Image (cartoon, grey):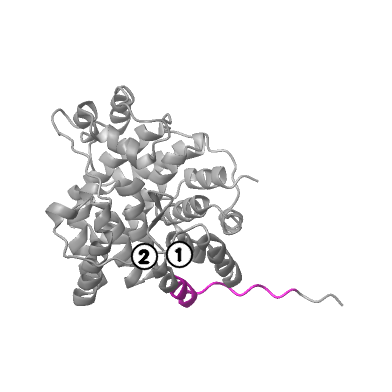
Amino acid sequence: MLMKTAKPAPATLAQLHHLLDAGVALAPTYGGRLSNHLPMAQQALLELGASAERLQAWSEHHETQLEPRVAARPGRVLPARDLGRIDSEAAWHAHFAARISAVGAAAALGEALPLLLDGVGAIAFHGLIRTAHAVLAGHEGELAFGLAHWAAHFLPLPTTTDGPPLALADWLQALQQLPRPAYPAGSLISGRMEAWGASSDFAAVAGRLRHGPDTLRDIALLAARTYAATGNFTVLHLLTGSHAMCVLEPWWPAPELARGFSVAAAAGLLAGGAAPALTLDHGPSRPWPALSAAACGQDNVHVIKLTHAAWRLDRRWPDPAWRRAAERANPV
């Protein structure tokens, strides 16, 4: 008689919180200015259905690529002085941890977003994304780290609103006609976004997207379709960033403050150099259980996060583009 193989025990929220607590020992960046993706991918793996054994093994493996946190004596932050100062991250963490302790996570997040949304492209959207995963994890300590990462790498992209608002297709066409600014070969995504933001030509176009109740959905679908068509690594961040904006939407102080995301999205699209795809041939794709299982078997943090973001966005705005994007990231 054949014995049935026991199904692996699933990862749990308690296990995730234990891992996030242990992650305090790790620096927020490594290898220069690359974001520590560990806590983001850990939360994504939990929701994608990873087993407890897989989540633990994946975490232990990925930790070896990171760097230890350097102890720093935090000072008092002044937003006018310290937003965008990389060396202020410890101070920002102390600030947000104190606010969460004083008023609670929800109120502290509501206080922080008016300050941070104009710099939403910080470190290639990773401050935003880490904050959103912390919210989904329900972990106050991780929330303080996500907000601090965002504040210390704050990336405002000045724009003007002169000229009539543009529909999405017209906005994309105008962006594609802009002359590319100079940036060194090998520049990181955030460096290329910053170079675009410093261009007066960019400033004259990026803020003119006509906003409405469906703008975030349209940007997210643009990212999914473009990634499905191109596999562009920079566009991947625009998709996961769109998902993060959806997670934080209940705490937006006002819809118009989310305009900073569309400006950052413009910089991200241009920094990636991919041709935007407004439509996509909706061919057959694998079902979500297969795509989620494939992502759980991945070592690549970006594939895990993209699959998680696309799965959650498909639940909110059903469309074949989400599965096509996840399938592009998880080839057979």
**Alpha-carbon neighbours of circle 2 within 10 Å: few (<14), some, or many (≥20)?**
many
Please report contact status of discs 2 and 1: CB closer than 8 Å, yes or no: yes
Residue 181 horizontal side relative to residue 319, left or right: left
Q: Residue at x 22, y 44 (%)?
A: 156
Q: Does 234 appear above or below 140?
A: above
Where does residue 34 sit, x and y in percent of width and height?
41, 50
Three-letter amino acid code at the position of disc 2: Ala
Q: Which secondary structure lies at badge 2?
A: helix
- Which of the 4 quarters of the picture holds residue 87? bottom left
Q: Which secondary structure lies at badge 1?
A: helix
- According to the picture, the residue beneath numbered tag 2 turns out to be 134
**What's the distance in space between the residues labelled 2 and 1, CA to CA?**
8 Å
Where does residue 104 sit, x and y in percent of width and height?
23, 74
Compare marks 2 and 1 and give the one earlier in the sequence: 1
Q: Residue at x 26, y 47 (%)?
A: 213
Q: Does 72 appear above or below 305?
A: below
Numbered range of the magenta stretch: 5-19
Q: Residue at x 53, y 43 (%)?
A: 324
Where does residue 14 sit, x and y in percent of width and height?
46, 77
